[in-house]
Image (tube, grey):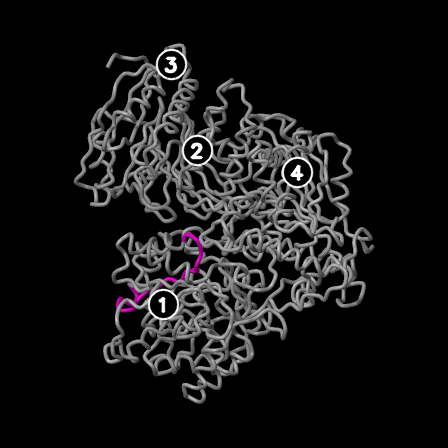
Amino acid sequence: VDPVGEGQLGVFMVFLPTVDTVPARTIVEAAAQREDLRVLGWRTVPVGTTVLSGTARRSLPVIEQLLVAADEAVSSDDFERKLYLARRLATRQVEDDAFFICSASSRTVVYKGLFLASTVEQFYWDLIDPMFETDFAIFHQRYSTNTFPAWGMAQPFRILAHNGEINTVQANRSWMAARSNDLASNLWGDRLSDLNPLIEPLPSDSASLDNAFEVLVRSGRSVSHTKEMLMPQAWENVGDLSDEMRAFYEYHAFLSEPWDGPAAIAASDGRHLIAGLDRNGLRPSRWTMTDDIIIVASEAGLSPADEIEATATGQLGPGDVLFVDLDDGRVIFADEARRRLAAKAPYVEWVTTETQTIHGPFDDLQDERYDATKLSRVFGYTAEERRLILQPMAQGTDPMLSMGHDTGLAALSEWPQRLPRYFHQAFAQVTNPPMDPIREKLVMSLRTYLGRRGSILEETAQQAHLLELRSSVLSDAELQGLTANTDPHFRAHSLDITFDATSGTEGMLDALDALCDSASAAVVDGVTILVLSDMGVTATRAPLPIVAVVGAVHHRLIDDGLRLHASIIAVSGEPRDAHDFACLIGVGASAVYPYLAIEQVRSMAVDGAIDVGPVEAQENYRCSLETGLLKIMSKMGICTIASYRGSELFEAIGLDHEVVDRAFRWVQHRIGGVGWDRIANDIIRRHADFETGDEDPGGYYKHRRGGMPHIAAPRAVLALQKAVRSGGTAQWEKYLGQVQDDRPALEIRDLLDIQAVGPAVSVEEVEPIERIMRRFTTAAMSLGAISAETHETLAEAMNYIGGMSNSGEGGEDPARFGTSRNSRIKQIASGRFGITPGYLASAEEFQIKMAQGSKPGEGGQLPGHKVTPAIAALRHTLAGVTLISPPPHHDIYSIEDLAQLIYDLKTFKPLARVSVKLVSGPGVGTIAVGVAKALADGITISGNAGGTGASPLASIKHAGSPWELGLAEAHQALVHNGLRSGLSVETDGGMRTGRDVIIAALLGADRYGWGTVPLLALGCKM
């Protein structure tokens, strides 16, 4: 190789396909030459494959380096940009999953792969070559938790290494795609289009974060600036933040939503090096400094010799950053680094002079623009909703309910369904903890900005010219303030979202298409506030489904390259609870004005149905919605509404692909069914009652005669109690008729037929009843949620039949240990109440509860008045003190933390099994694989239909998935990874009959949990 000048050598570190490397090599060379780089040749990287596992060896790519040179006139930064463009071009052109460019730089080289961390130098022989020198290194060891292992997805990536999860990655990817058409930067000239897509179609959240870092760093920002922009500290509610720093963070919030989630990162562009944490500090990061070295690692003890000579040590806190200038050899801590960043531009002036705040109070006047009674029928309001949803919210409380979800899937219901009922909220478990929106409210924010956004690659005063709202929930005064604003930069335009009620499905879809056309044309014309309103409903005009409208317009504007030019405001009579708002914001709305729900609340106060005034009732309602939104966001560990907006973090169960493809492209979608015809028919059926129809009887939340059917209806409960008391098959058949045979299909398993695989066998050949019953457990129910008598009865009954009862969270009377009343499964939940050495020693199995089927991603709270002296004694607390079980375990923020707890429990009692309770949802299979790798003995997959002592209504009805989906996914993922053998898989959540057990067994379960049915059999009042 011809010698080149210092800084003029670039290295592509490339994973090549094993079958034929020539095409990929040719493409990489051509991409480099297109950037006027001189190709010097290819180098085979020496590796030692003996350290690889069989799986890693089978997928091992050809690993080579392409050496290139730049002219002496090319600056170092321009050289990096040329290498970046060449890498992007080659990546787009090579269509082979085995191909991956690990790095392309004149400053850094990335060595990574699928091998144990301790064998890295045995695999890459370059790293033990005496001539190989570097002044820094970024090293990360991990195992895949949310993605399946692949060579290209190993860490570090090109700029950074990331320990954690980006909970908001779906929204981040979507908004980065929307920014593609609004890029502006003098550095790139006419090459801006070559930067797209900004985020490559890779499965890893860490890879996407690296893509975002890379494009911003190559566009002129430092790695520390990029970190503070994409992963800012929690600045919104911090009172002692300087004006300069507050303005810096607020300005960058105009440019980008945070990449939110538990994260410790180390990043470098080859000249500067940073280590930093997310706003919550949910990953450890400790530093040690000597006279000539600084080490940052997740744990102390990485280099004992250096720690002995340490001159300073410490750890990074939430949002912290540590900066190393490699050119100057200086270590700069957060305060100084941030002061430098805040002085780079007049952020205080820009934010103070350009940004406008919109705030307007509620009033007690009736809105005369519509007939609330008629619209209530059209939008399906019921007396039940007013009593259970709106009334508590108007009084400032969260709507709660016990029992579980037994009305089945919206797609299977014969009753008209609103679109949000098809959406199931996503939640975090194990690998990325949920948040506590009450006690960690400091780091959360609903602050919302409206208006046209500028390029993410540059900083100007114009980009601060936005409107600010306290939250996404609007009052009428705030809506009027938006639409009447005379600033030409905030042109508002209202679009009617109704259609001819006689035109059927075709008319509805034509109206939706026309609406999207009108929205796009309005934005092209300069509109920056797009108001979508169904206030124009009349006797002949029916409302388009608001969630589909917002989703369709959102994606149409992305497709047209216009999404960042305007904000979407939903003005609708349909949304009433926090789930409805989450759906609207999740599919792209910036703010929502629920005019009909607000009128209902005002009317309740005026009529004396609640004991607060109309203005206070409306404000309470808004606060309840805001609290509900924070709870839904926190289930996914998301702190800011900006990062939740457009995330589409839902699973649509039972919606046809034609619906999802048109309006909800990012929504998880595994089971189809309902198409536009059913959606249109449901709207038209409700609209038929506009003038004189009867109000929907309700029954969605609680059983009501003439209302929506419930599986656990009073007749079914009575039939069960008669059956268990009689012991005869006749009564049992009546019970089966009520809950299984004689009711409409409401659940996924109702649609499944059991296929015979051969001729029938004699009963003598079937597993004996005694052995079958050993596979039964009673689901975790804490002493306090149920009475002591019930708790003991369940334990005694399960021990009698050979099954196992689960103590639940809350401890157990030591007098029961070692007796027939002992719960053989002892649960370990986030509050750790009642967990003592004696409690643990009495267990045959430990269950670590990471989530609960009725409220995944949420914690629990036992009010002080329910903490009796007896309960307090078992939980080792004081009577009358409210007890809190936080959403996450505060010692489990990662799969490694879970593995540590499993190890500790097995060390304490080696003969006891350790199982982990998960909740069914998309991706639970990958999480189950991670749990198995953490050496759990069993996994429980809970469905969303399980009972509960008390949970928010929005969680009972709209969070989690049926166990059939999660069980099948977890079983298949474990089998695929060779981890199913020796691991028990249990399922619970709505088990009622022997047929349910058979279905669960066929889908992969070998243990079966029962909760509500045993309680009903005992005669408990629910």
Q: Which residue is mark 4?
A: 450
Q: Secondary structure at mark 4?
A: strand
Q: Give the Cα separation between the discs numbered 2 and 3.
A: 24 Å
Above or below — where is 20 with respect to 669? Answer: above
Figure quadrant of the N terminus: top left
Let me know if residue 814 appears in the view: yes
The disc label shown at residue 754, or none: 1
* Sooner in the amino-acid sequence: mark 4 or mark 3: 3
- Amino acid bearing label 2: Asn
Seen from the viewer's position, the closer of residues 537 and 767 is 537
Q: Secondary structure at mark 1?
A: loop
- Amino acid bearing label 4: Leu
Mark 1 or 3: in front is: 1
The disc label shown at residue 211, or none: 2
The disc label shown at residue 36, or none: 3
The picture quadrant where one finds residue 285 is top left
Q: Give the Cα separation between the discs numbered 1 and 2.
A: 48 Å
- Amino acid bearing label 3: Asp
